[in-house]
Image (cartoon, helix red, strand yellow):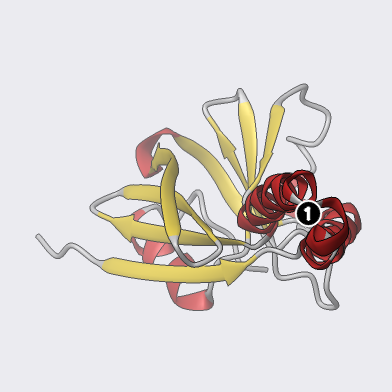
Amino acid sequence: MSDSYVECLVKAKASGTAIFFKVLLIALTVSFAVSTLLFGMLGFLVAVILGIGAYFVNLYSDLEYEYLYLDKEISVDKVMAKSKRKRVATYSVDRMEILAPVRSYHLDGFRNRKVKKRDYSIGVELQPDLRYAMYYEGGEVILLSPSPEFVSAVKNVAPRKVFTD
């Protein structure tokens, strides 16, 4: 039995509001830290609270997704600010309905379904669009941005379910 192992790490694009709040909180933290001379302990306390807020906004806005294929299973991990890792989901290839590019004609029969959408991709539509849609057990669609090696490893296991048009 030949098990294949493929990892793929993609960086998700941060939203504009997250970047705005990150810059705003950092600027307010610095300004209140400097103003501790004027406000004393109150300015320091506000600076610490704003600094903690800036840390958490940075943690949740700097995201990377790691896809791992091993033994007919696709695992998705979320890496926050390159310091904290969290397992988001695990999907079995046997229960997958289809894996195809987002703009593929193979997905035409699936488009009108009412399903939950989970986006673990880069978050933006590039030209050409390299994102893939995976319909899983009829109840959810998962958007991924896998590497060609990742797609070919899954295709070796389920050739009738994976399309690369």
The 10 Å Cα crowd at callout 1, few under 14, some 14 to 19, many 20 or more, is few
Q: Is residue 59 above or below residue 11?
A: above
Is 49 situated left or right of 23 in this image? Answer: left
User: Residue 128, position in %: x, y?
Assistant: 81, 77
Picture quadrant of residue 59: bottom right
Q: Which residue is mark 1?
A: 105
Question: Circle 1 — which element?
Answer: helix
- Residue at (36% x, 38% y) in the render: 94
Residue 51: x and y in percent read: 69, 55
> As displayed, is residue 136 above or below residue 48?
above
| Camera sees residue 124 | no
Q: Residue at x 9, y 60 (%)?
A: 1
* Identity of the residue drawn at 18% across and 62% down: 3
Query: Viewed as shown, does residue 91 lie left or right of 106?
Result: left
Residue at the image position 88 percent from the left and 58 percent from the top = 38
**Front residue of this view, candidates 87 and 100:** 87
Q: Position of residue 108 (x, y in %)?
A: 79, 43
Q: In the shown orientation, is residue 54 left or right of residue 71?
A: right
Residue 57, compared with residue 64, is above or below; it is above
- What type is the residue that disc 1 sits on? Tyr
Q: Can residue 96 be seen from the camera position used here?
A: yes
The relative height of residue 79 versus residue 130 in the rendered view (above or below) is above
